Amino acid sequence: MRAEIIAIGTELTTGAKLDTNSQWLSVELSRLGIPVQYHTTVADGLDEMLDVFRLATQRADLVIITGGLGPTLDDLTRQALAAMLDCELILDPQSLDVIHGMFASRGRTMPERNRIQAMFPQGSEPIPNHRGTAPGIWLDVSCSAEGPGSQMAVLPGVPSEMKYMFHEFVRPRLPSSGRVIRSARVHCFGSGESAIEEMLGDLTARGRNPEVGITAHEATITLRIAAHGATVEECASRIEQTRLTIRETLGSLVFGEEDQELQDVVVAMLVSRGKTLATVEQGTGGLLAQRLTSAAGIEQVYRQGTVMTGNALTDRSDLAHTGSLETSPAPSLDWEQQALLLAQQCRQRSGVDYGLAVGALVEESSAAPTMHVGLSGSGFDAACGVTQIGDPAIMQGRTAKTALDRLRLHLLQG
């Protein structure tokens, strides 16, 4: 069985709103062993919707549509379905009574326009909506001339209504696929997308079971493992074998799985080792501290976060090399050394086990923009540069992650 999900609404095609319904439905269908082959988004136009519906019935066994079931003039989903089937819209008295009752329960009179919500393409069935005024629609178009056959479930676009109706009334009607789909995610940092794919070799080949897809976000590489099988146990076994192969192949490039972020892993490592941390940052504007404070257990290990402005170490006398700006000249250090000095001073002044620093963004005509990361611990000091590659908008996030990863790798080495 193949599925297609169609999201209706000009607010979606213009970008005014984000389509989260399709993502949610895809996850739910995957759990049922029903792969989703297409996501389609279409504006509130009768002709456009009709074209999309016809195409969907030709290429999918199951079509789930969200949106366009309201009472306003731009809610045209039911009219497009009737046009596709070349049939009339028929009033369902029971659905109308329910809508009347909903308004009455709120002490209001139902506007005449809401009557359209109780009208359905001939031969279809209402899907009850206990949380709103728009019933859904169930259609079996297997006898339609439009395609080889599809089952169609039409649900409101309001997420809380859509999710409830799917679980209560759509999911029980879906035929068993006889297959199970399960997925897992493994996260990596420290190498590029293409380099990691090259290291994994045939593991990312199309048609493999499980399939391994690669996505990148702010230099975090996520490996998405999707296994197909007859049982949950079979899928879990396939995923585990692939997960172990990934970890053995990529080693310390792998930092976590599922919803884990770098800060979650680093804080957990600090907690388990009884170590404390302070940070100081210039070029990342507090992003490093923000990420750290989102991690569980941070209050046990994080002692201080300082955000500095300016492009040079001499801009802050409390972190200067010696003395104060009034009595001491600026230290003649390169940018990497300055980041390391920031980390050292941060650790000493905060009385913590580790000082982690991000220096200023350095923009010199002879080189690409760069930030520098410094890490200082007892008997351990290290620094490195992070050069801007690609989109400048992700530079701060990438640098903050690099700082976290440097600390993670050090903690891994004991």
Image (cartoon, grey):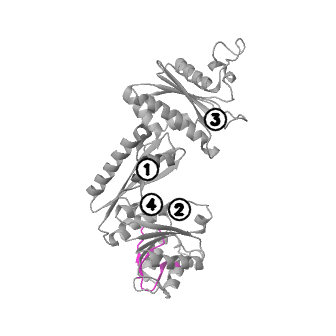
> What kind of residue is marked 3?
Thr
Quarter of the image where one finds residue 167: bottom left
Label 4: element kind: helix
Disc on the earlier residue, 1 or 2: 2
Label 3: element kind: strand
Figure check: 46 above or below 36: below
User: In whole angstroms, how far apart are the C-alphas of marks 2 and 3?
Assistant: 36 Å
Give the labeled residue for mark 3. 370
> What kind of residue is marked 1?
Leu
Give the labeled residue for mark 4. 24
Is label 3 in contact with label 1 (beta carbons under 8 Å)? no
Q: Is residue 297 visible?
A: no
Residue 38, position in %: x, y? 48, 68
The residue that appears at 34% across and 64% down in the rendered structure is 33
Q: Quadrant of the N terminus?
A: bottom left
User: In whole angstroms, how far apart are the C-alphas of marks 1 and 2?
Assistant: 23 Å
Label 1: element kind: strand
Q: Does 272 appear in magenta?
A: no
Disc on the earlier residue, 2 or 3: 2
User: In whole angstroms, how far apart are the C-alphas of marks 3 and 4?
Assistant: 39 Å
Q: Quadrant of the C terminus?
A: top left
Residue 398, position in %: x, y? 56, 40
Residue in the foreground of this view, choosing between 377 and 63: 377
Q: Which residues are magenta?
A: 115-141
How many numbered marks are there?
4
Residue in the foreground of this view, choosing between 364 and 397: 364
Figure check: 20 above or below 414: below
In the image: residue 252, left or right of residue 328 = left
Label 2: element kind: loop
Give the labeled residue for mark 1. 223
